[in-house]
Amino acid sequence: MKKTFQLTHPKIKLARMVDTVKHEVKKYVKRERNKSLPEDVDYWDFDCKFGHTEQEAQPVHLTAINNSIDEAVALSLTSFYIEILVKPGIRQNQV
């Protein structure tokens, strides 16, 4: 998912727009995690970026996406960019 979300709409309030964005991100992650894993992969991992624009996007952890969205709202941004790319994850054996 590579998308710029707009937080302005003539009829929809800001709080509903934010909830919609968070729901869309959650739905995307759930859909990707439910895909079948290749044989040599333990889990699906995600590379995430968040920024005011695509050029300013910085890497963030998946769990920090909601906090980043809330921070964008607190800064009164009219839009922001989210990039979430799925990648195979392999657990490291710990002895």
Image (spheres, grey):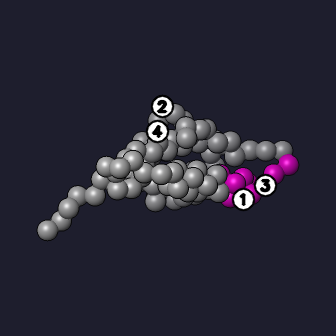
Q: Which residues are magenta?
A: 11-21
CA separation in Å, label 4 and label 3: 26 Å
Q: Which residue is mark 4?
A: 57
Quarter-of-image position of residue 70: bottom right
The residue identified by callout 2 is: 55
- Residue 41 versus residue 85: which sits nearer the camera? 41
Query: What residue sits right under mark 1 in the picture?
Result: 15
Q: Is residue 10 left or right of residue 30?
A: right
- Mark 1 and mark 2: span between their CA atoms? 26 Å
Mark 4 Cα-neighbour bin, 10 Å: few <14, some 14–19, many ≥20: some
Residue 24 is situated, as x and y percent measured from the top left of the image, at 64, 52
Which residue is label 3 attached to? 13
Q: Mark 1 or mark 2: which comes first in sequence? A: 1
In this rendering, position of residue 76 left or right of residue 55 = right
Q: Residue flagged by tag 1: what amino acid is it?
A: Ala
Amino acid type at mark 3: Lys
Give the structural element (helix, strand or loop) at label 2: loop
- The residue positioned farthest toward the right in the image shown: 11
Residue for point 55% across, 37% down? 2
Discs 1, 3 touching: Cβ within 8 Å: yes
Q: Amino acid at mark 2?
A: Gln
Element assignment for label 3: loop
Whole-Å distance between the Cαs marked 2 and 4?
A: 6 Å
